[in-house]
Image (cartoon, grey):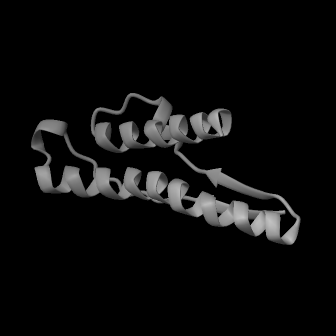
Amino acid sequence: YSFVVNNAGRMQRAKFMDQDPAEIQQMVHLNIRPYVLFSKYGTLNFYWHSNEHKHKVAMIYLSSVNSDRILPYSSIYSSTKKFNEIWGSLLSQTH
């Protein structure tokens, strides 16, 4: 087996209405975009690698315990981590 761990995250604790839109955009960009793009481009390479070397490859998607908590000062972070949790689950089922 070869394992790849997909983990990225940034948190800013603040009330949603007090957060700078640029900070929100940066958090969403870092916490979600790498998961989606890595899944798309990394998966192709991993399948080639597993077929070439005759072994299995596993991608591990990390989220956060905050994805299941309602935290008023972490709404963006918690939401992006919930996305990561759902994204990893969907890929494992639709793949």
Measured as percent of width and height from the top left, residue 30 is found at 35, 58
The quadrant in which residue 22 appears is bottom left
> What is the tally of numbered marks visible in this picture?
0
Say which residue appears at 18% left-offset and 38% top-offset. Answer: 16
Q: Nearer the viewer, residue 13 or 85?
A: 85
Say which residue appears at 58% left-offset and 42% top-offset. Answer: 88
* Horizontal side of residue 94 vs 53, given as left or right: left
* Horizontal side of residue 75 vs 43, given as left or right: left
Measured as percent of width and height from the top left, residue 40 is found at 51, 55
The quadrant in which residue 54 appears is bottom right
Say which residue appears at 12% left-offset and 49% top-offset. Answer: 21
Say if 69 sits above or below 49 in the image: above
Say if 78 sits above or below 27 in the image: above
Looking at the rendered image, the quarter that the C terminus falls into is top right
Measured as percent of width and height from the top left, residue 78 is found at 39, 39
Looking at the rendered image, the quarter that the N terminus falls into is bottom right
Say if 89 sits above or below 59 in the image: above
* Horizontal side of residue 14 vs 46, given as left or right: left
Say which residue appears at 71% left-offset and 60% top-offset. Answer: 47
* Horizontal side of residue 54 vs 92, given as left or right: right
